[in-house]
Image: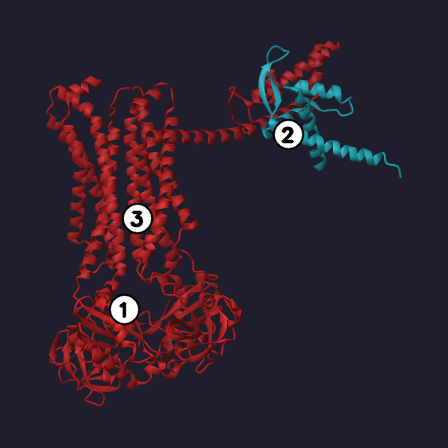
Amino acid sequence: MNGRRDLYGTGSPTGKPLREPIFGRTTGDEVADELEFHVEMRARELEAQGVDPALARRMAIERFDNLEVVAAECRRLADRRVTTMNRIRYIHDFLGDIRFAVRMLSRRRAFAVLAILTIGLGIGAATAIYSLVDAVLLRPLPFSDPGRLVAVWVAENGWKTDPVMSRQWDRIVLGQTEYDALREHATLLSEVALWSSGSAMLAESDGSERINTIRATANMLPLLRVRPALGRGFLPGEDVLGGPRVAMLSWESWQSRYGGDSGMVGRSITLNETRYTVVGVLPRGLELDRSGAAIPVWVPALQDSFDIAERNNRAYRAVGRLVPGATIAQANTQASAVIGAVARSPNSGMGARIEDWQDDQTRGVRDSLLAIFGAVGLLLGIACVNVATLMLAEGARRERETAARLALGAAPSRLARQLLAENLTVHLLGGLVGVVLAAAGIRALVALAPPGLPGLADVAMDWRVLGFALACTLVTGLAFGLIPAIALARRSRRSSILLGAGVTTKDSGRLQRVLIAAEVALALVLLVGCSLLGHSLQRLSAVNPGFAAENRAVVRFASPRAFWSDDQRVRNFYHTALEDLRNLPGVIAVSGSSATPFAGGASSSPTRAEGRVYPDGERGVQTQQRSALPGFFEALDIPLQAGRTFTATDRDGGELVVIISESAARRDWPNESAIGKRLHWQGQWRTVIGIVGDVKFSGLSRDDEPTVYVPFDQYPDSDAALVVHVQGDPAAMAKIIGARIAPFDPAVAVTSITPMTELIANSYKQERYRTLLVSLFGVLASTLAAVGMFGVTARMVSQRMHEAGIRVALGAPVGALTRLMVGETMRGVALGVVMGLPAALLVARYLSPQLFSVHPVDPVAFGTALLLLTASTLVATLPPLSRARRVDPARVLRTE
Amino acid sequence: MAARDHLRGTLDVLVLKTLAWGPRHGYAIARWLEQHSSEVLRVEDGSLYPALYRMEQRGWITSDRRASELGRPAKFYQLTAAGRNHLKNETAEWLAFSRTVTHLLEAEP
């Protein structure tokens, strides 16, 4: 044999012998055999022709030229074939495992359905929430190089602590002055464009309609690197004072209103009774503000005298594009210096804030979304742990079968692989169910979503979302599928000869405890989050807004310039409306103001109390301002603290009077009565005649804001909203009220009539949405956790029944054994609480900015969570544990 | 390279042809080729076996071990359905090619 080895070379070229799988011989042997056979046959033939045997063999070998090289080449080819075959066989085996798994699962239908539904619930919820997170936070904006688009705001550091302005200190809009300065000097921004949204009356063949509009500078489209779908964009020179009246249509409005007529370019439309020439159509789907409604028409910015008349008028949001290589921080520093240099008072602390455009848009919702995403992650975790416990329990039920197969020579690794395949199958089927659930869930999520969620329109089941579902399925399937598989492999190594029922080892006891602990810990974190958010929402909704909201309807209007530039016309309209509605049966009171609570329209300006010195030169302090119609405080039941409210004598040309809110009185005259004092506002001195309670204006969570009220007649405002106090349901009165108001002035359109309670509820819709989702996941998760704990405990008891029976038969008291099992379960629960509490504290800290008047370590919230958890633990574990008490030694021993 | 590929391709087809009548071992294939190619087309023993291994990997032929003339098992090759198909296609192509060439070479001006 030695000679042959030399002849044909040894082993495989890679050095390690590969096994020929069928014959159990190496490929080297196979090749050597075959070639040797050939040589022998050839030599024999030559011998038959009379050649000397030794020579015949040499001749036979020589015919190969170089036998060793040929053998090596053959071995290489054979090895490659074996590798390919192994690979194919592996896949084939795995498919076989899956087929086997499906067969096993279909035989244990209840178990399979439970496991698949659990996983499906987890994956479905996670996928649905991911679709939201993806559309709102992750998917890049649909512009070229979106990472370099930034939002540009003016920031006023002095406002950080101001009660009126603190919420918007770094979100101040820009005016022409800042715009010009930034374009000139902020070299790290290759371009800055302005835009603002508003509304206008669009005249149509059948009357007119209120539409949303955007005013944008001519450089907006070039900055975004988009081209008009039709016609042209605005030209430099059109976005200036008195520029030509031109307009662009959105693609969508071009399609729906004008039937996609390409002849629209060059035609004119009438906005606010002014003719605008349509110069182009915007590309499809272009949105500057993803949180708003559709914007059918764009017009050029900076055309109004308002924009340049005074340096202080700021009305525009701004978007910029970073030059390549510049960071946001660098651009921020530069722009701050530029804005600071053009600020009216050089020491005002004015600067700029630049932030990634997408981040800026999602600023208000990011934390909420991530909290919801975190909650759904915990739910998915619990679902996976649950299925792992189900698998273990199932494994325990199959213990006899497993032991038998091991005894018959099945490799533990093979059984483990089968179990893994079974788990993966469950997870894959669960993922499938999850995708179906998610598709339905996404629809519900979108329908329930609070208004103004940026990107909500893009939430859909797409490839990114499906990819997430698949990734989730595979990761959880592999991670959690391995647990029971490893448990099986370990168990079988120790006790493969134990054919009897109830194989218990210390090991499986520990695994049970860990699983119980994991469920408890995950559920605890989620429940703490739930109860903190729930508690916060409850506190928020219980806040007294400072006025009576029940039975009040809020009527809002829209009007064109011709109306609101004529003060007398505005006065007439509102007085007629008040007079008329007051006489309507069922109406108790009617009034209104330039900024009715929760109806929008807030504005502020500086005020000065007489005799006080203000740090900011002569300007004074920012104060909220309202023009109130007669009877405003009475109609809303806003308490009068001192002095009097407005009467019919407080009219245009009368004494200039003002009513201030309690917080304004406290701020301006902390140690004396404010009544009779004088206040400087909008260039005039006014006498304080009354002090009223503070009211929440736009959010229940906001601090009291110092406010001044002036008589409507002395300072008319065309955008005033009416408040109608009615008997009974305000929604039912809406139609009648609308019909009454319509004829008073043909230019004024009623845009909405809404119950005040609804407006208030809408103000915390986002908080409610978040709390609703997190609570839903919390309920689902604790239910799943309870089911899981039930499963684990039941399994433990059924395993121990055998042991218990023997012990009882030998005279051990039943109670001691039960106590042992209860103790074991409680050790798992305690471990879970110990693991879960620190995590819950971390989560609470993370949530704290989102909580309203609830401390993150709120004892009530933590107590509620622990109580709920304890209750569900007891409900889940007591029934199986009590079964242990009824152990019947005779029956146990019979099965022996 | 192209020429060698072509030669290798030819050898492949010839080997497949020898297997068209039933299983044979490597030596029988070599002998059949020697006897029928009348020394014009000499197949090296050294190139036959790599060709067999290559075709086995491609799935054109399979092998098993059967009793041989020497009394011990030897590796026998057999055509697969894919191999039979390949042989058919290659044969048709070769015949068409050679007919054309023959036609051209025998052509009168």
Q: In this view, does A726 lie to the left or right of A324?
A: left
Colour for chain B in the figure:
cyan
Q: Can residue A116 be seen in this view?
A: yes
Query: Quarter-wise, where is residue A52 in the image?
Result: top right
Q: Distance between the residues labelled 2 and 3?
A: 57 Å
User: Mark 2 highlights which residue?
Assistant: B85
Identify the image's colour scheme: rainbow, by chain, secondary structure or one colour.
by chain
Letter of the chain that mark 2 sits on in the rendering: B
Residue at image location 18% in from the left, 74% down from the top = A585
User: Mark 1 highlights which residue?
Assistant: A167
- Name the kind of residue labelled 2 in the image: Asn
What chain is colored red? A
Query: Quarter-wise, where is residue A105 in the image?
Result: top left
Q: Is residue A235 or residue A285 the one in the foreground?
A: A285
Secondary structure type for disc 3: helix
Letter of the chain that mark 3 sits on in the rendering: A
